[in-house]
């Protein structure tokens, strides 16, 4: 009896620069992928699961959208001007995040911090605008408890808002890490995840903007 | 200050939960005192609690699962005893307590017994089978485990502090809404399942990444062992299904806590939306459990028949077929909703079609055994018990899949008999077989065969005696979850069923005895070679128990059943392959992150259940602080020097060389 002793010369699955003969890493028979691929791939999977959560909220909103229970309809309460500004803020934030990615690639601390600060401020502006919308609705008595339609609306849009808020916390931590630890590979991988998360929130917002606000004000 | 929590939450007037709770608390305090007195705490902390090693986490998952299996079994005993005596009488359990018992039984068995056992075996086995050193995200793996443990802890706290849900294992609204369930029972359910569900979701992400991105060189998809394939399919289902659970429970939580109207009767809420959403998770959940079970049977049957798995490619195809189609059958849980004939017909057909994939698997296992030299070890007995039992259980499922029949059988004891038939024979038998099969790999000694066989025979007889009468009372018109009844025809059958439970108690006793006897006689049951069963996959290539890094050098896989081929070649040539060149190995460092996360998750969960808002804020700040501290770590890995690796691997090679020299191997 023998052992699985046929060898390759490289020891570690988590290390960079580690491949089988003539094969790409992380595919088919090429052996373990690099850390950057593994981390990015895992985070993609996380984003997909998050998309499924949003899909459930979209579905429930679609089911409940007409159940206004004598309360206001979508057309009566949506303020498209404010939503346009919210969208502009969030898209600008995503753009700044893209600039930050370039700055990180250039290893430029000042530009990185500046771009991330701009990302955060535009994201914060979005949250403030959304909060003012929610507060205004509540003040009119159109809170989430008023009808199933408003329940679905507040939950779907609010869940996105909670994601952006959590993202802002993460962003602050990210800036502090770049400042304190510099452009280490592991921090670079975390930033890769953060930027994916931030752009993903934009994608969800585009769906909310179209399916909730645009469709809601037309119908 | 303490929200809804007061002394009235402790059920001083109800002896059963109070005594049970007191015994558990005493046992836990006793265990803690023993650990502290013996000075084992530093060892436990360093080697287990903070461990990020997939093998250690797997063992802890299995331990948690076995404990919860026992808890769920005690609930089952209470229910069978109640129904055996509650004929023209109230029985010994008051209705509100009985309702909690069946709710806790279902919740615990599915989410805190079966899931940890399945995930535990995946944790232990998959990286070994893939020939790698750990999962993709070792620390995240530890977080997953401890979050699952948090959920289990919260469910068990509800035994003594407050109450558990009385709504069944899936809290259907409007019953589960605040108006009809004003107590904390449903809140315990919601937060326990939510927290452990997030743990499971993270496990899914971790294992899909591991299996798709971290395999030994040469381990192409069509060379992956069957258990790894089913683990992949199961984790893909986790990725797609558990977010639905998270979202659905969050909606019910919002209804209860903030007066939202997702599922209420008022203001346009839609209770049937809950049924659809919860079963969009709940049905795939069944396959999340049973697919890895199929993987275990595949490994066991192939090993003990001494043959490669018959129809490997069709087995992979059937697994993925089930993986996809399992998302298209959820409506069969409520054909009676009134969706109309067309919708019901579509889901009836999809439900019947899923049996095709399972049928392919059954034939593959039969043909694997055909012409093989079968060794009737305990894992093999469990597998053969499964083959015979599961087929009839599946047939009753096909009956239920026919909507007109379902209108009569819906929510009857026939249904209860059916799903126990397939889950017990499909999942529980597999888990016991798997534990038996991989035990020597984990601990370095085999389990005692005699006690194992006794466990099997008492289990299978007890199983039939317990559950077959339920089909009968179901057809006689008995609905599920009855606290008492007045129908004479049912009484005898329910008493037979409780006799079956007595046999199952004997089986459980045999299982415990097996573990104890095997531990005491571990020297004579010792597995010296690391390959006690004449195995075929890579986990048998390393020592038992494996070193922390699993493989001194990563295997270079060139074939399906690569380890088997290598072993045959070594026998033919009567020598091992060349000694490899050893290098230093980089491994992830232990981290208390998972445990600390679970600590704060417990605080947050408990605070939310009892509306103790300040405590919730403390928990959230603690959780964020944990995140920051973890992000700030500078040295996530450590190196194992090449000398140390070489020394350990030479010892392993020497043990194997010894067998080659002596020529004979007495395979169990």
Image: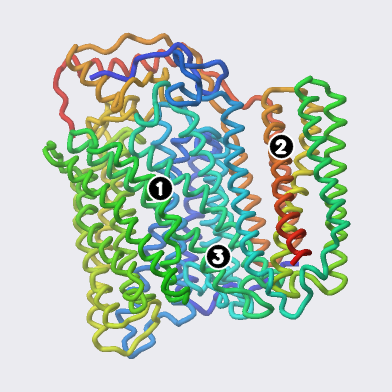
* Alpha carbon distance from label 3 to label 1: 21 Å
Residue B11 percent coordinates (x, y): 55, 75
Q: x, y percentage for residue B179?
A: 63, 80
Q: Is B1 above or below relative to B286?
A: below
Label 3, on which residue? Answer: B189
The label nearer to you, 3 versus 2, is: 2
Q: Which residue is mark 2?
A: A194
- Spatial distance from mark 2 to mark 1, Cα to Cα? 32 Å
Q: Is residue B494 above or below residue B329?
A: below
Using the image, name the chain to which the residue with label 2 belongs: A
On the image, which quarter does residue B307 sit in?
top left
- Kindly identify which numbered label has been placed on residue B158: none
Whole-Å distance between the Cαs marked 3 and 2?
32 Å
Tag 1 residue: B118
Mark 2 closeness class: few <14, some 14–19, many ≥20 residues within 10 Å: some
At x 42%, y 70%, the residue is: B342
Looking at the picture, tell me which residue is in the foreground, B576 or B618. B576
């Amino acid at each position: 009896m023998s052992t699985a002793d046929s060898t390759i010369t490289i020891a570690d699955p988590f290390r960079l620069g580690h491949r089988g003969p003539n094969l790409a890493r992380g595919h088919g028979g090429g052996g373990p992928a690099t850390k950057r691929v593994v981390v990015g791939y895992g985070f993609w999977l996380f984003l997909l699961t998050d998309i499924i959560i949003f899909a459930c909220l979209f579905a429930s909103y679609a089911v409940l959208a007409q159940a206004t229970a004598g309360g206001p309809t979508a057309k009566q309460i949506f303020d498209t001007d404010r939503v346009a500004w919210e969208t502009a803020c969030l898209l600008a934030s995503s753009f700044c995040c893209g600039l930050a990615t370039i700055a990180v690639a250039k290893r430029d601390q000042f530009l990185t911090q500046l771009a991330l600060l701009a990302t955060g401020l535009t994201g914060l502006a979005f949250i403030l605008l959304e909060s003012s919308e929610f507060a205004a609705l509540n003040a009119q008595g159109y809170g989430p408890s008023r009808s199933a339609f408003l329940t679905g609306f507040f939950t779907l849009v609010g869940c996105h808002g909670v994601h952006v808020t959590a993202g802002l916390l993460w962003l602050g931590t990210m800036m502090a890490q770049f400042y304190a630890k510099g452009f280490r590979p592991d921090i670079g991988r975390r930033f890769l995840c953060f930027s994916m998360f931030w752009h993903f929130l934009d994608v969800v917002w585009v769906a909310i903007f179209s399916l909730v606000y645009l469709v809601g004000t037309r119908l | 200050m303490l929200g809804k929590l007061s002394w009235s939450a402790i059920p001083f007037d109800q002896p059963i939960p109070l005594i049970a709770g007191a015994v558990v608390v005493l046992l836990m305090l006793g265990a803690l005192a023993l650990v502290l007195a013996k000075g084992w705490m530093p060892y436990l902390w360093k080697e287990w609690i903070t461990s990020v090693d997939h093998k250690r986490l797997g063992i802890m998952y299995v331990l948690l699962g076995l404990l919860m299996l026992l808890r769920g079994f005690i609930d089952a005993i209470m229910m069978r005893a109640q129904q055996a005596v509650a004929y023209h009488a109230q029985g010994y359990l008051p209705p509100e307590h009985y309702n909690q018992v069946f709710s806790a039984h279902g919740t615990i068995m599915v989410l805190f017994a079966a899931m940890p056992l399945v995930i535990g075996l995946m944790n232990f086995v998959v990286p070994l089978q893939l020939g790698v050193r750990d999962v993709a995200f070792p620390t995240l793996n530890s977080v997953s485990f401890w979050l699952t443990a948090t959920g289990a802890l919260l469910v068990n706290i509800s035994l003594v502090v407050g109450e558990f849900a009385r709504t069944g294992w899936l809290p259907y609204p409007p019953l589960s809404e605040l108006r009809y369930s004003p107590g904390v029972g449903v809140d315990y359910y919601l937060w326990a399942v939510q927290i452990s569900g997030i743990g499971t979701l993270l496990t899914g992400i971790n294992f899909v990444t591991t299996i798709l991105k971290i395999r030994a060189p040469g381990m192409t998809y069509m060379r992956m062992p069957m258990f790894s394939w089913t683990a992949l399919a199961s984790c893909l289902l986790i990725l797609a299904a558990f977010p639905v659970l998270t979202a659905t429970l969050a909606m019910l939580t919002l209804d209860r806590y903030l007066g939202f109207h997702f599922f209420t009767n008022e203001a346009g809420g839609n209770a049937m939306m809950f049924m659809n959403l919860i079963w969009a998770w709940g049905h795939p959940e069944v396959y999340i459990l049973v697919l890895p079970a199929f993987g275990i049977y595949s490994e066991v049957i192939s090993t003990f028949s001494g043959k490669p798995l018959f129809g490997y490619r069709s087995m992979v195809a059937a697994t993925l077929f089930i993986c996809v189609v399992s998302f298209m059958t959820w409506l069969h849980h409520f054909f009676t909703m009134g969706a109309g004939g067309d919708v019901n017909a579509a889901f009836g057909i999809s439900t019947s079609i899923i049996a095709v994939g399972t049928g392919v698997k059954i034939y593959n296992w039969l043909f694997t055994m055909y012409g093989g030299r079968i060794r009737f070890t305990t894992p093999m007995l469990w597998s053969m018990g499964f083959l015979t039992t599961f087929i009839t259980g599946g047939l009753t499922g096909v009956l239920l899949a026919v909507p007109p029949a379902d209108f009569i059988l819906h929510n009857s004891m026939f249904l209860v008999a059916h799903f126990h038939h397939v889950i017990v024979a499909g999942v529980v038998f597999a888990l016991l077989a798997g534990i038996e099969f991989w035990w020597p790999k984990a601990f370095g000694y085999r389990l005692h065969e005699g006690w194992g066989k006794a466990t099997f025979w008492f289990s299978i007889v007890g199983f039939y005696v317990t559950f077959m009468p339920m089909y009968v009372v179901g057809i006689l018109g008995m609905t599920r979850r009855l606290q008492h009844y007045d129908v004479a025809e049912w009484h005898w059958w329910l008493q037979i069923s409780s006799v079956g439970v007595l046999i199952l108690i004997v089986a459980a006793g045999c299982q415990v005895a097996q573990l104890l006897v095997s531990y005491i006689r571990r020297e004579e049951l010792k597995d010296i070679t690391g390959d006690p069963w004449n195995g075929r996959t890579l986990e048998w290539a390393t020592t038992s128990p494996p070193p922390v890094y699993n493989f001194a050098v990563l295997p270079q896989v060139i074939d399906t059943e690569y380890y088997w081929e290598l072993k045959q070649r070594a026998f033919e040539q009567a020598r091992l392959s060349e000694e490899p060149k050893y290098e230093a190995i980089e491994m992830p460092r232990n981290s208390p992150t998972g445990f600390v996360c679970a600590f704060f998750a417990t605080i947050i969960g408990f605070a939310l259940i009892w509306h103790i808002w300040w405590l919730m804020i403390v928990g959230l700040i603690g959780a964020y602080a944990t995140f920051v501290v973890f992000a700030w770590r500078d040295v996530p890995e450590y190196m194992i020097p090449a000398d140390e690796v070489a020394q350990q691997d030479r010892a392993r090679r020497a043990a194997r060389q010894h067998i080659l020299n002596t020529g004979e191997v007495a395979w169990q």
